[in-house]
């Protein structure tokens, strides 16, 4: 909480075993496909899908009822002018705030919609987690520090500036 006001640490100054706040550009070779929308690729998404149908309350009136809520993330690098660090983002305790919000209809059906918050490749983010240099797990680079969830099991990501597409 209040990640925006916490002092940040340069990646070159990170110490193993400490809780840190790092600000930099998110970058990954592998991205995820957003389940809704037109071929949208991202590093992390938090999506809610709803349908407009008769609910259990309100005298048979139709209402928006959530069908599915899903959060997925892929691991990625964060880099600043002093170096880069690997972020283990595919964790259940991920807190994503300030991200780009997308909304729309699901596959052109009038009675289904979605709302999604996404973190894209190239976004400038501020991240808070535990610095670790322990043995790399599957898919992690061997010679870099890793930011993992903290002692409470949470990894906070705040999107500071959204990447602007030039196309």
Image (tube, rainbow, N blue to C red):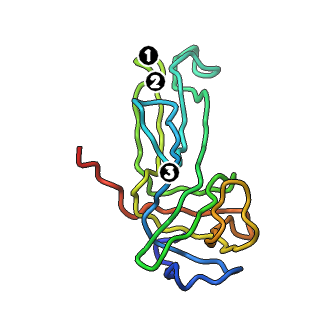
- Looking at the rendered structure, the secondary structure element under dot 2 is loop
Q: How many numbered tags mark residues here? A: 3
The answer to which of 91 and 29 lies nearer the viewer is 29
C-alpha distance separating marks 3 and 2: 27 Å
**Left or right: where does residue 89 sit relative to residue 126?**
right
Q: Nearer the viewer, mark 1 or mark 3?
A: 3
Whether the residues at callouts 3 and 2 have beta carbons within 8 Å, the answer is: no
Q: Where is mark 1, residue-wise?
A: 109
In the picture, residue 39 is in which quadrant? Answer: top left
Residue drawn at (55%, 69%) of the image: 85
Residue drawn at (59%, 82%) of the image: 14
The answer to which of 166 and 56 lies nearer the viewer is 166
Q: Mark 3 Cα within 10 Å, few/some/many (few <14, many 20+)?
A: few
- Looking at the rendered structure, the secondary structure element under dot 3 is loop
Work out which residue is located at the far left of the displayed protein and give it.
167
Q: Mark 1 Cα within 10 Å, few/some/many (few <14, many 20+)?
A: few
Q: Where is mark 2, residue-wise?
A: 106
Sequence-wise, the earlier of marks 3 and 2 is: 3
Whether the residues at callouts 2 and 1 have beta carbons within 8 Å, the answer is: yes
Q: Quadrant of the C terminus?
A: top left
C-alpha distance separating marks 2 and 1: 6 Å
Residue drawn at (65%, 52%) of the image: 90
Q: Where is residue 64 in the image (x, y as percent from the top left)?
A: 52, 26
Q: Where is residue 161 in the image (x, y as percent from the top left)?
A: 36, 62
> With respect to residue 85, does 107 lie above or below?
above
> With respect to residue 162, does 1 lie above or below?
below
Q: Which mark is residue 29?
A: 3
- Looking at the rendered structure, the secondary structure element under dot 1 is loop
Q: Mark 2 Cα within 10 Å, few/some/many (few <14, many 20+)?
A: some
């Amino acid at each position: 909480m209040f990640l925006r006001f916490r002092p940040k640490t340069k990646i070159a100054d990170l110490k193993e075993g400490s809780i840190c706040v790092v600000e930099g550009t998110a970058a990954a070779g592998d991205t995820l496909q957003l389940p809704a929308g037109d071929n949208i690729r991202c590093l992390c998404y938090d999506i809610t899908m709803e349908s407009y149908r008769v609910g259990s309350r309100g005298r048979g009136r139709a209402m928006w009822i959530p069908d599915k809520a899903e959060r997925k993330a892929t691991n990625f690098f964060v880099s600043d002018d002093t170096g880069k660090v690997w972020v283990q983002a595919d964790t259940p305790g991920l807190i994503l705030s300030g991200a780009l919000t997308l909304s729309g209809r699901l596959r052109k059906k009038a009675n289904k919609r979605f709302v999604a918050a996404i973190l894209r490749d190239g976004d400038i983010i501020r991240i808070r987690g535990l610095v670790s240099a322990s043995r790399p797990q599957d898919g992690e680079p061997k010679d870099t520090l890793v930011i993992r969830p903290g002692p409470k099991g949470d990894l906070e990501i705040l999107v500071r500036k959204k990447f602007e597409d030039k196309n």
